[in-house]
């Protein structure tokens, strides 16, 4: 039982990681920044996309449909033709529900109406296909990566992020510098081409204006003891245990200010935006050599405490924001560059 519990726990963690990775950046591009109270709706859209693929396969491929029917707890008197008809209707309707969910994710003030709303609902077909493909692809890649990590007796870690528009190269530069300052010398290598496929599909579905936000080439930072792969919604670290621990610590302590969000909800990212404004103001202050300005920035930072005290976000995101707030205050007080 203990072995089964550990196995199911590992599968659950991997599934959660895939869900976070797939939704974080894709949802930002497809739907904009999603408030916390609508994260459940976003998850239902994702599950609906997977269910649609199952229904579609069951409708198109008779053998798959027969397998699904035998797996369902139906009584012998139940007409299987009716079930097949229901699967066909579901394959036609579920993408429309996905598109409708995407419509309701958008804030009321900016929600499209009329023909624009109808187009948004119809976008449920390509969105469902895109999300389902992304989940399946990332799940396969995740299993392969985990197997390779176990075979090589290495450790791994994941840090969810959402790279800013046009900020991928900046993020790579900052990450490489942070690792170098921690004593981890790495070199840049192109990441596996297959990992760029989800981003390119997102760009096609989201439209031409988003294509400029998709990095042309994903990057891996490599050393004999460490590999760090940077995706638009995830930093994947793999290597010797000590090197992975040092890399994780370097990212947490030195990437307080970079071209990426370390949280995923709209409310948390709004706080990150305010923190980023203080960091940029600090940079201008150092260039101008004004120290009194730093005191005012500390006051602005501490004025955010009531917001943090009542911020309704997941605890993990709240911890990230609080850590960033403390790190920025520390650097402002000692007069060092943030991070």
Image: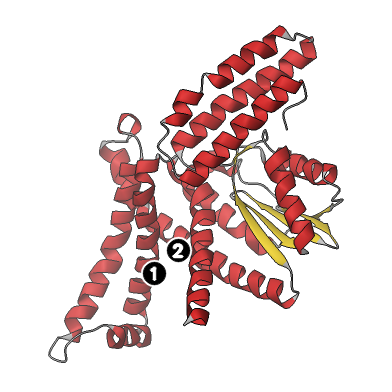
- Relative vertical location of residue 234 with respect to residue 71 in this rendering, above or below: above
Could you tell me residue 285's position as x and y percent? Answer: 73, 13
Q: Earlier in the sequence, mark 1 or mark 2?
A: 1
Of 334 and 67, nearer the camera is 334
Check residue 53 in the rendering and tell me which mark sits there, or answer none: 1
Q: Is mark 1 on a helix, strand or loop?
A: helix
Q: Do the residues labelled 1 and 2 touch (CB within 8 Å)?
A: yes
Q: Name the quadrant containing residue 144.
A: bottom right
- Relative vertical location of residue 240 with respect to residue 292 in this rendering, above or below: below
Could you tell me residue 138's position as x and y percent? Answer: 56, 64
- Image-based side of 70 in relation to 267, left or right: left
Could you tell me residue 20's position as x and y percent? Answer: 51, 54
Name which residue lies at 39% across and 47% down.
39
Name which residue lies at 35% across and 66% down.
52
CA neighbours of label 1 inside 10 A, class few (<14), some (14 to 19), many (20+): some
Could you tell me residue 34's position as x and y percent? Answer: 42, 41
- Check the picture and name the quadrant holding the C terminus: top right
Q: Can you identify the residue that label 2 sits on?
A: 132
Name which residue lies at 16% across and 88% down.
75
Q: How far apart are marks 1 and 2 (CA)?
A: 7 Å
């Amino acid at each position: 039982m203990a072995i089964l519990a550990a196995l199911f726990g590992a599968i659950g963690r991997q599934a959660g990681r895939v869900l976070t990775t797939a939704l974080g950046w894709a949802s930002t591009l497809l739907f904009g920044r999603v408030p916390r109270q609508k994260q459940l709706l976003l998850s239902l859209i994702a599950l609906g996309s997977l269910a649609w693929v199952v229904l579609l396969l069951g409708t198109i491929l008779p053998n798959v449909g027969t397998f699904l029917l035998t797996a369902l707890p139906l009584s012998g008197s139940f007409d299987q033709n009716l079930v097949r008809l229901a699967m066909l209707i579901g394959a036609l309707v579920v993408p429309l529900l996905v598109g409708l969910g995407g419509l309701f994710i958008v804030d009321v003030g900016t929600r499209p109406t009329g023909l624009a709303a109808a187009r948004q609902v119809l976008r449920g077909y390509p969105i469902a296909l895109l999300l389902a493909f992304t989940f399946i692809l990332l799940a396969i890649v995740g299993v392969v990566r985990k197997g390779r990590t176990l075979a090589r007796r290495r450790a791994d870690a994941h840090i969810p992020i959402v790279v800013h528009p046009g900020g991928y190269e900046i993020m790579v530069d900052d990450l490489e510098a942070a690792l170098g300052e921690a004593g981890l010398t790495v070199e840049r290598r192109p990441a596996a081409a297959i990992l760029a496929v989800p981003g390119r599909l997102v760009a096609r579905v989201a439209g031409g204006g988003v294509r400029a936000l998709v990095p042309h080439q994903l990057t891996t930072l490599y050393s004999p003891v460490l590999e760090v792969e940077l995706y638009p919604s995830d930093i994947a670290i793999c290597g010797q245990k000590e090197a992975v621990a040092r890399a994780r610590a370097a990212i947490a302590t030195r990437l307080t200010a970079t071209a990426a969000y370390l949280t995923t909800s709209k409310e948390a990212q709004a706080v990150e935006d305010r923190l980023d404004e203080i960091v940029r103001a600090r940079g201008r202050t150092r260039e101008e050599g004004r120290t009194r300005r730093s005191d005012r920035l500390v006051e602005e930072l501490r004025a955010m405490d009531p917001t943090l005290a009542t911020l309704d976000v997941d605890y993990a995101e709240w911890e990230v924001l609080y850590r960033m707030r403390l790190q920025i205050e520390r650097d402002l007080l000692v007069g060092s560059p943030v991070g």
